Amino acid sequence: MALSATSEAATAEPIGGRFDGFSGMTAGGWVWHPRAPEHRPSVRLEVDGEMLAQAPADLMRQDLLDSGIGDGRHAFLFSLPDALRDNRVHQIAVRVADTGEMLPYSPRNFCTALLVDAPRFDAERPWIDMADADQEVLRRFRDGALSFRLARDLLLWHRQGYVIFENEIPPALLDRACADFNAILNQRLAMQFQPPGHPPMSLSEWEGPIPFADTRFLELHTISEAAAEIALSPRIVEFCATVFGDTPVAMQSLHFAMGSTQRAHMDFPYVHTPKPAYLTASWVPLEDVHEDAGPLFYYPRSHTAVPKFDFGAGNLMAFGDGWHVRAFEEHLQHWAEHLGLERKLLMPRRGDVLIWHSALVHGGAPRNDPARTRRSLVTHYSAANIYAHDRRYPDRPPSVVARNGGLYYDLQEPEYPSRHFKLEDTLLEAGGAAPAAPT
Ligand SMILES: O=C(O)CCC(=O)C(=O)O
Ligand SMILES: [Fe+2]
């Protein structure tokens, strides 16, 4: 009697949990009733609207226990059937069995065409990632195809997985990007952003003060031409064009007002491109970075030294965020330490640029001073012939904008403030005082 009373009470209570995502050919997540933690609700797996399996959410997960989710025995894991290995997009949903309630982040799309194993990853690398790239750089330099500076940068890139350009971005441009961002905030324009614990949403939909800690603001380069000019500044474009042997496309940008505190990761499993090794990222500080502001950390040489993480069934790509992503982060941290790789902190001056390799292990250090800002613009690049579609509009041709020999794909929303802040205004107003940081 007592047990059934508990279950009835429990099913009437709000649930906590989420559909975390996929690891290889498994789908997982967790669910519990915070007011009745001893109750283990069952969940249902649906594929393209058809129920396929049901199981109690009672598996032990240490990360749940560590986050205060009861005794940690609230996880579920479903094996996906081999019939889904058909390279088509399938809609996978997870519901609470008793109530039919859909879990947060459900449904998710699943497609085996997006799974990439190590042989495919390696076969589709750019020339600079091949073992003999040093020789190729020297040959091109001797032939006069590469400047001394570019040849040196490529050799450093090949060996260490990153390059730093000092004093590259004009201060007036950085001032303008900050001013544009502040204006976007003040006017609550329809810029996409991702506050912690939320999916991406528009600033215009958010009520109350904007949280800055652990928040990312998306695609500033499509609203602010100053940000586009930074993201596609000539030396970054030249470098990425040489690495890819193709025109670089700035495929996404993230603006951080504060340190991200992101754990150790490689970017390619998250930032998906059709050939995952055709990916680079630039990190541009919009202000000098203080050591207490949670600087970027990175491990030189980790791009080749640290083994890639197998998310299951040989797949190197991550889908969703959950138990598999925690295991990925722990794998990278373990290997970086085990190999004795040096952990560097990036404390750049505004105007400097860091470019890193898609497999360089990096993250955001803890913020010792929680009030300190660390404004930065991160841009990810792929190659135009490989990344030929705007991920936001997979069924439409991209709206291509050319800049300094590189490209980006513009927004295609009539109501959205595409290229709202023009660069001409920057030039007119250059020389003004640096705008204050957001508070
Ligand atoms: O800026 C940071 O702290 C991390 C950013 C990052 O890892 C990324 O955007 O890929
Ligand atoms: Fe990253």
Image (cartoon, rainbow, N blue to C red):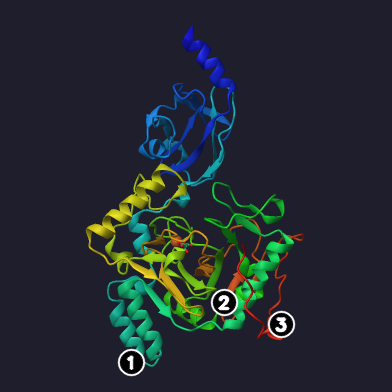
Q: Nearer the viewer, residue 174 or 87?
A: 174
The residue at the point 31 percent across, 77 percent down is: 133
SS for callout 2? helix
The amino acid at mark 3 is Glu
Q: Nearer the viewer, residue 121 or 98?
A: 98
Direction top: furthest residue:
1
Residue 295 visible in rendering = no
The amino acid at mark 1 is Arg
Which residue is tagged 1? 142
Q: Can you give x and y, in whole percent of width and height, for residue 115 in the image?
A: 43, 50
As drawn, is 226 to the left or to the right of 272? right
Disc 3 C-beta below 8 A from ligand 1: no
Rounded to the nearest angstrom, the CA distance separating label 3 from label 1 is 41 Å
Which residue is tagged 3? 424
Q: Nearer the viewer, residue 218 or 256?
A: 256
Q: Is residue 39 above or below residue 280?
A: above
The residue at the point 35 percent across, 37 percent down is: 62
The residue at the point 36 percent across, 92 percent down is: 143
Q: Can you give x and y, in whole percent of width and height, for residue 419 in the image?
A: 70, 70
Circles 2 and 3, Cβ within 8 Å, touching? The answer is no
Sequence-first tag of 1 and 2: 1
Q: Which numbered marker is on residue 230?
A: 2
Q: Can you give x and y, in whole percent of width and height, for residue 175 in the image?
A: 61, 77
The amino acid at mark 2 is Ile
